Image (cartoon, rainbow, N blue to C red):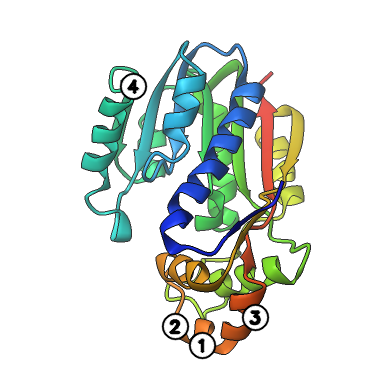
Amino acid sequence: MTEVIDDPREVEQAYARQYENLSREFSRVIQSKRGILAEIGCGKGQLTIPVARLLPHCRFRVVDTFAGAYTGTPRLLNKALLQARLRNRVKVYKADYLAWLWDQYSDSYAGVVSSEFLPEIDSYELSVLLSECYRVVRPGGITVHSFLSPIARNRRQKLMIEADSNPKWTKTPPKEWFSPKPALVLSELRRAGFRDLHVEKMKSNLIIRSDASRSFLHSWDVRTTFWKTHQVELASEGLEVPDWSIISGLKP
């Protein structure tokens, strides 16, 4: 069912529902894995909290640099974890993700996960990250990564991808891509040694219009010139969050 948001006050909760849906997919894929799960690029805990609720048999170590717009987030995240009664199962680390992974013992994690982190790195870093995921995950363990599709199904999705990736519009252009293509992620997982690879697709069904789209673009550091250029279209048709890709692999 498609959700259409026009009120800026509803955007945050609408996006939180995206992560609730993602968390159900993550928990289904991870299923009965027990032990410690590492999350790379945890941010504000958008995925951390709902996944931890659904996987009560797992403990979590989550890492982020918490730089830029995320300064001060560790305190807020720890407060949210306390309110959710998850503080005893989730340990938060402020660190560079690779430096942190390099400090971890081999074969020590039940899994390594991320959501919307692969868009923040480039193809070289993707290769290094997935190799490290393979190293630190124990035999039989899993890695799961979700990200928004770089391939638009319609004009609304195309506009959103354009706003977030074209240096003409965004104040924080990506290193290489809006998101990597799923085929590349699968190839790198296979190269790293993962097997039983799976790709799940999840439609966002989230359209953000009018003043809500303006607020949303501002939160993504998109320049006001994008809004001014596409104002009529954004008011009537809006932006649509692209489909989610959820890619997983097992360590033999």
Residue to which mark 1 is pinned: 228
Q: Are dots 1 and 4 in contact, CB under 8 Å?
A: no
Q: Which mark is residue 86?
A: 4
Q: Amino acid at mark 2?
A: Thr
The disc, 1 or 4, on the residue closer to the chain's N-terminal end is: 4
| SS type, badge 4 | loop
Report the side of 190 relative to 107 (left or right): right
Q: In the figure, 25 relative to 222: above or below?
A: above
Instruction: Characterize the local packing of mark 2: few (<14), some (14-19) or many (20 or more) Cα atoms within 10 angstroms.
Output: few
Amino acid type indicated by mark 4: Leu
Kindly tell me whether residue 117 is visible in this rendering.
no
Disc on res. 224: 2
Task: Give the CA separation, mark 3 to mark 1.
Answer: 10 Å
* Nearest to viewer (mark 1 / mark 4): 1
Tell me the element at label 3.
helix
Task: Point out the tag, 4 or 2, that comes first from the N-terminus.
Answer: 4
Q: What separation in Å lies between label 2 and label 3 (alpha carbons)?
A: 15 Å
Contact check, label 1 and label 2, Cβ < 8 Å: yes
Q: Which mark is residue 233?
A: 3
Q: How far apart, in angstroms, are the residues tagged by discs 4 and 2? A: 39 Å
Disc 1 to disc 4, C-alpha distance? 43 Å
Q: Between label 3 and label 4, give the one nearer the viewer.
A: 3
Lower sequence index among marks 2 and 3: 2
In terms of sequence position, does the residue under pointer 3 or pointer 4 come before the other? 4
**Residue 174 appears at what percent x and percent y?**
51, 66
Residue 190 horizontal/vertical position (percent): 73, 36
Q: Amino acid at mark 1?
A: Lys
Q: Position of residue 42 (x, y in %)?
A: 41, 41
Q: Quadrant of residue 70?
A: bottom left
Which residue is pictured at 74% across the width and 72% down the height?
A: 155
Alpha-carbon distance for marks 1 and 2?
6 Å
* Residue sitting at x 47%, y 56%: 11
